[in-house]
Image (cartoon, grey):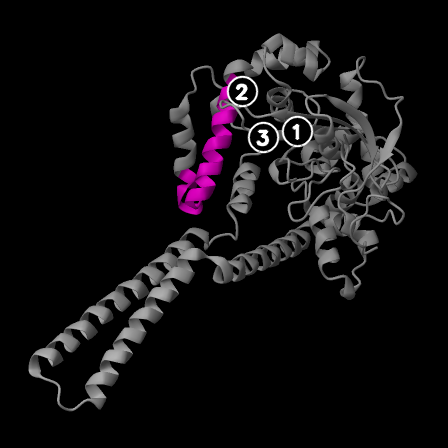
Amino acid sequence: MVHSLTGTRIRQQRTRIGLSQTALARQAGISTSYLNLIEHNKRGIAGKVLLSLARELGVPAQSLTDDTDSGLTTALQEAAAYLPKEAPETASLTEFAGRFPGWSRLLAAVFRKTQDQDTAIAELSDRLAHDPFLAESLHIMLSNITAIRSTAEILRSVEDIGRDQTSRFHGAIHDESKRLSEAAQALIDYFEKDIGENARTATPEEEFEKFLSKHDYRFPSLDLPDADADEIDVLLVDAARSMSAPTRKLARRMMQTYLDDTKIMPLSAFAASALAADYNPSALAAEFQTNLHAVFRRLAGLKRDGVAAPAIGLQIVNAAGHALLRHPLTDFPLPRHGNACPLWPIYQSFTQPERPLLEWIELPNGKQFVALAVALPRETKAFDVPPDYRAAMLVIPKDQARSFAPWLSNTQTVRQVGTSCRICPRENCPARCEATVF
């Protein structure tokens, strides 16, 4: 799929090297008018034309089409929704991100930091109000202080206290002072430990997402035939200094799942089978004797160097809607903060557990996708324990859906959805739960 900012990138590179539009068009073997349309993102570009332009501009073709930050435009939209009174020009966000990617990344980073700080402040406020350890520590300290004050008041106000009794009072003050000091030190240690573990980011989920993004959601060393759990330790060594303990736990759990998936579905065998089965998850689950969630995870990470698979997005949530894993697409962002659109099939699947759903959906910008979703229970090993359902959804861009023919029909009704209510312009949506900023 060719990104809508390709023309903007071509124009920027042409201007950077001092080449006129006419000269570039002549060298690439196309008309100047056609190049003008391309540079204003009014015409698509691919194949030989893209390669010719990239060659004349002296850059890899991939640098003109790939979006290095799949959530950049969405992050800017969320930032606009965060401060709507500033009236940012949201209609030109895509162009702004294409022309000024550095500034866009900076604004997105500042916004995310603000969001993370707000989350941390809310968590600390809630902790101060409800943390049982803090409540108990303060109660102990107040008790110690009261005992010390009462004993000191007796010593101050009573003159004819015997030596033995005075000694006992002094001993009580000493003991209570020692306990007060120990309680205060325990409180200090508690806060220092918490601050040390969370100094880099507000939440382990934020750290975890950065870790996955750094690795592009793929771990080639775990795809090797002889890979084992020791390789997970190796991958975590480099990240240990920048990760809190809770984040390392999340990363280890995710990579263990990744490793388990590779043992069931080795990369080369799975890639060949996926191509032969037209990427049909049901057929692949039957062939490899596994569940659809495992196949979903494998399909979402299949595209890479050496494997020409379609681009596929993935989201996994629990029954409360909390995102457990996000693998976003450039044109189908997955919100990190707040809830996503309730009309997405991933949420609808909870009403029909274990039934695979297939639905065509359309975002407000007109871009269409195929969504495959299914809610499955985690393994339950005890009687009388309710199943813990988790739902997974694959998102396939319309122009990639041809890779899934013939089992995937494109004649079904298209459902109108959004990303999240705050940045969705569909005013009359029956599922809206909060006002839009547009």
Q: Is residue 116 magenta?
A: no
Front residue of 33/349: it is 349
Left or right of residue 128, residue 294 in this image = right
Q: CA distance from mark 3 to mark 2?
A: 20 Å
Q: Which quarter of the rendering shows the C terminus? A: bottom right
Q: To which residue does mark 2 refer? A: 261
The residue carrying mark 1 is 392
- The residue lying furthest to the left in this view is 163
Q: Tell me the quarter of the picture where residue 34 sits.
A: top right
x and y percentages locating residue 379 in the rendered image: 54, 23
Residue 287 in which image quadrant:
top right
How packed is label 1: few (under 14 Cα within 10 Å), some, or many (20 or more)? Answer: many
**What secondary structure is found at the residue carrying circle 3?**
loop
Instruction: Please provide percent x and percent y for residue 91.
Output: 83, 52
The mark found on residue 352 in the picture is none
Identify the mark nearer the N-term, 3 or 2.
Answer: 2
- Residue 17 visible in rendering: no
- Going 33% across and 58% down the picture, which residue do you hit? 189
